[in-house]
Amino acid sequence: MHAPERRTWDEATESFIPRTEILSSGTSLPHKLQNLQGWLTAGSFSLLLAGTNLTTPLLPVYRSKIGFTPFMMSMSFVAYVGVLIMVLLLFSNGRVVRFSPLLMCAALILAAGSDVLIGTATTAGVLIGRAVAGIAGGIGTGAAAALVVASLGARGRSVSATGNLIGAVLGTSFAQICVALLDARAMYWTFLVHAVICIFVVVILASVLTLRVAENRRILTNRGQDVSSLDGSVRDLKLRPFLGGCIAWSTISCAIVFLPSFFQSLGAPILRAVGVLVLLVFCASGQVFSPLLYRLVPRASGSAASWIGISLLLIGAILHNTALSLIGFGLLGIGIGVKYRTGLLVLTLGAAPVEQSSLSSVYAATTYGVAAATVLVAGWMGAHFGLDHLVPWLFIALGLVTIVFSPWAPTLSDSIERETLPR
């Protein structure tokens, strides 16, 4: 008896098609153009998010060169995240998804404008530029999600999570290199280079989107399968991905904000300089290699890697063991990456590009909002009790929350097994 042929849901035709048909059509020009749109949009989204992370390594330079106070550092964070969350929620309405090609191009142009403002290296320029970056990120998140799913189908569902982390790695690394090579001049050249790349990419992206204008209009105005009509087991998962994503993003946000200063106070310059970068690299790797992890450990949710990573990180800090802490950074990054990506995939199971855009925007807004609140509360507590006392207890609390939530955390099998279905 022959096994049932595996079929994949095609959003454009609203039908399941055999994988053999997909493979046989892979050499056609329209199919190549469709794939090009998907991967180019994914790269554009990573470029967009890379720009929002350029300022992180430059904060000490701003403090010494233009008199940035700790309050101004906090304001630069609030200016970006606050505007980002509002725009994400505003553009989560499914009716704006039809304009995704225009919105994606506008996001890159706004990102270039943000670079020009921040590149003035003035307090006002940095704050206004960060707010403009929030607008760019807000309109680009949903637009990118819709366009990538319209082009790549289920393969593109994790673009909002993976593109975010890849952008964070690239942006932070590039800015750190610029600071090392250019010192104070990095305040100008870092953003000029990013602006030029954004303009170059938007010209190419606009050309591809123009060639596919009819196909995109048809797909982006078709709601396809109604997410609310999915089976009960999927609906039951809808709260869990939000909780998992909030825990993951709150953990990585606290790590980025507090751990470099914590390890500097402990006299650990290597951990201060590369710890967060290791975290981001392994976080992005955990997302990119999630399909491989699924084949090895399908029931993994990222929770175990997260709390083991936190434990090793803190034990290494207590013992002044740099290697142990770096292993902790890596494991924590893998756990966060898997948890955040899995949450988004489970949330958007069965969604057409229209729903993908809306759900991705709401997911990002919720996780960013909770993370921002966590950072602000932790910062207020740190001001009262001291950073050295705060950080260990903060991450112990985050580890305990991760352990408590782990039995309910969405797993890799929850997100991947439903991406292809038999007819």
Image (cartoon, rainbow, N blue to C red):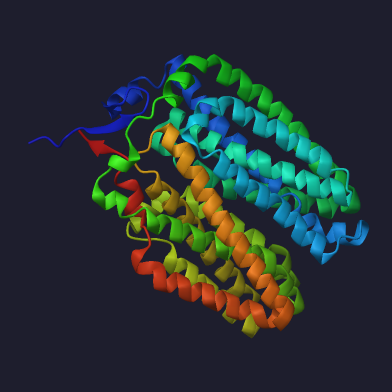
Marker count (numbered) = 0
Q: Is residue 361 left or right of residue 263?
A: left
In the image, residue 422 above or below residue 62: above
Q: Is residue 260 left or right of residue 143?
A: right
In the image, residue 178 above or below residue 4: below
Q: Is residue 108 left or right of residue 242?
A: right
Residue 359 coordinates in the image, percent (x, y): 46, 43
Q: Residue, x 54% and y 35% (percent of image)? A: 144
Residue 136 coordinates in the image, percent (x, y): 66, 39
Residue 283, picture quadrant:
bottom right
Residue 140, picture quadrant:
top right
In the image, residue 102 above or below residue 416: above
Residue 337 coordinates in the image, percent (x, y): 50, 56
Residue 19 coordinates in the image, percent (x, y): 29, 29
Q: Residue, x 73% and y 48% (percent of image)? A: 174
Q: Is residue 254 visible?
A: no
Q: Residue, x 58% and y 61% (percent of image)? A: 371
Q: Is residue 408 visible?
A: yes
Quadrant (top left, top right, bottom left, bottom right) of the C terminus = top left
Quadrant (top left, top right, bottom left, bottom right) of the N terminus = top left
In the image, residue 156 above or below residue 258: above
Q: Residue, x 56% and y 65% (percent of image)? A: 251
Residue in the foreground of this view, choosing between 249 and 61:
249
Name of the residue lying farthest toward the left: 1
